[in-house]
């Protein structure tokens, strides 16, 4: 199977006979390019071994909210739920459906369900009579009403020998359904996107450089979110301390603005969109020393020359249909400067941060942005995580792609 679904999937496995199919669901998701974290309910252990699911998902399986060894250790369900792009509960028993309806939180999976901010797909599986029971049907109605995606169950021979509705949908159908719902709708699906991130370093001599405080977090969040929406992502990054947490991204590491310019110009031609979130140095030492500069008593003067404005070059050479997104970090007269940049650099979208806003800018995990597009009123967004900001930027990009 092609790697088409670069998502982080929290797979909840509950205690029914169809739990054996969770192994196949896990395998298909991993083959499709997903990272899968399995969370089993305690009773699911009676039906399938954690070792099977851990081996297939390449991660230890989680079950307990609190360690039972007296150590005080616990599993951070909030973090897990935030990590996930989607929560899939397959199989979902009648008991789990009932607990979901009432917000019961007596195991790790239920805590994840309650904490989930992402879409939740539910694949019920149970015997015919349990499925037909008015309590289950009422619970199912509520679950659907609350916006959970319900897939199946199907009709056929059940484990009990009875024939009727209650079989969990086949793993292939669950994965197809997931792909269709998650990225069928995204205009980034199948497109190629170039994202730049981090600072650049401009050499003064072999050991010293001029740099800036960019952490790369915003660019990495954009690259990961674009990949999650099915885009092929080229990430060109300056020196940062970040690791990528998702497949579907090709990373090119560069040092200086000139190296970033070379990489971007080489890659941009094949890209449907370019997002320049890197904090590229505007100036570099005109004559970097070949050897380490020795300390002297006199003042040291380093003459600086402008670097190439990569964004302006890409904007001037953009091909039909290509969309260029720039960033601006301003300290004063923000909107006027940003409008000017939008026009001057031929941009389709500009993301403005103001250093005057608390929580915006470098090194933080949050950002406060305003989106500007030609002919549109500026759209100011509230303070949000960089991941949420990445989603907002890509939602806007999808509108103009
Ligand atoms: N940028 C670039 N190449 C450069 C400098 C900046 O591609 N040499 C890009 C950044 O990645 C960002 C945008 O240009 O997307 C805005 O950078 P900024 O430094 O704010 O804009 P400037 O045009 O340099 O304007 P000013 O210095 O007046 O703020």
Image (tube, helix red, strand yellow):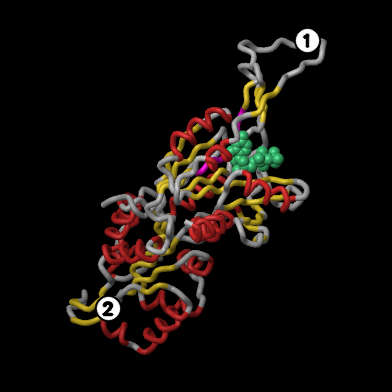
Residue 143 in percent (x, y) is at 44, 78
For ligand 1, tell me if the residue under mark 1 lies within 8 Å.
no
Q: Identify the residue at horizontal 51%, vertical 67% (top origin).
A: 111
Question: What percent of the width, then of the height, locates residue 350?
Answer: 61, 51
11 in relation to 224, above or below: below
- Magenta stretch contains residue 198: yes
| Foreground label between 1 and 2 | 1
Residue at image position (60%, 44%) is 345
| Vertical placement of residue 315 versus 74, above or below | above
Is residue 313 visible in the rendered image? The answer is yes
Residue visible at 55% across and 48% down?
A: 325
What residue does disc 2 label? 166
Q: Quadrant of ligand 1?
A: top right
Q: Residues within 10 Å of mark 2 (few under 14, many from 20)?
A: many
Coordinates of residue 373 in the picture (x, y in percent): 60, 56
Q: Quadrant of residue 171?
A: bottom left
**The magenta segment:** 195-201
Q: What residue sits 33% from the left and 66% below the top? A: 177
Front one among 96 and 169: 169
In this rendering, would 318 be left or right of 295? left
**In terms of sequence position, does the residue under pointer 1 or pointer 2 come before the other?**
2
Within 10 Å of disc 1 (Cα), the crowding (few <14, some 14-19, many 20+) is few
Horizontally, residue 301 falls left or right of residue 204, namely: right
Element type where label 1 sits in the image: loop
């Amino acid at each position: 199977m092609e790697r088409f679904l670069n998502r982080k999937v929290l797979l909840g496995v509950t205690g029914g006979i169809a739990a054996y199919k969770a192994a196949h669901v896990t395998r298909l998701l991993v083959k499709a390019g997903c990272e899968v974290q399995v969370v089993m309910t305690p009773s699911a252990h009676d039906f399938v071994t954690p070792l099977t699911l851990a081996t297939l998902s390449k991660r230890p399986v989680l079950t307990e909210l609190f360690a039972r060894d007296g150590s005080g250790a616990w599993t951070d369900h909030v973090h897990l739920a935030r990590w996930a792009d989607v929560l899939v509960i397959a199989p979902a028993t009648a008991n789990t459906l009932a607990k979901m309806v009432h917000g019961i939180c007596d195991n790790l999976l239920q805590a994840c369900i309650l904490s989930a901010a992402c879409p939740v797909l539910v694949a019920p599986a149970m015997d015919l009579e349990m499925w037909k029971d008015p309590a289950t049907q009422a619970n199912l109605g509520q679950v659907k009403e609350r916006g959970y995606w319900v897939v199946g169950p199907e009709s056929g021979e059940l484990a009990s020998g009875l024939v009727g509705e209650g079989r969990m949908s086949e793993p292939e159908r669950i994965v197809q359904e997931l792909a269709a719902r998650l990225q069928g709708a995204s205009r980034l699906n199948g497109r190629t996107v170039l994202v730049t991130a981090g600072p650049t370093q401009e050499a003064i001599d072999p050991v010293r450089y001029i740099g800036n405080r960019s952490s790369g977090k915003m660019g990495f969040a954009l690259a990961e979110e674009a990949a999650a929406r099915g885009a092929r992502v080229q990430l060109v990054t300056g020196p940062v301390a970040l690791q990528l947490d998702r497949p579907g991204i090709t990373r090119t590491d560069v040092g200086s603005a000139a190296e970033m310019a070379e990489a971007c110009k080489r890659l941009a031609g094949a890209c449907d969109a370019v997002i320049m979130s890197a904090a590229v140095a505007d100036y570099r030492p005109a004559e970097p020393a070949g050897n380490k500069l020795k300390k002297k008593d006199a003042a040291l003067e380093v003459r600086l020359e402008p670097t190439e404005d990569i964004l302006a070059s890409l904007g001037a050479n953009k091909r039909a249909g290509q969309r260029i997104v720039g960033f601006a970090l301003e300290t004063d007269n923000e909107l006027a400067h940003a409008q000017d940049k939008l026009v001057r650099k031929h941009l389709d979208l500009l993301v403005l941060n103001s250093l005057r806003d608390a929580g915006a800018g470098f090194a933080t995990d949050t950002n406060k942005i305003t989106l500007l597009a030609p002919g549109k009123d500026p759209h100011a967004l509230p303070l949000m995580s960089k991941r949420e900001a990445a989603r907002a930027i890509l939602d806007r990009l999808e509108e103009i792609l």
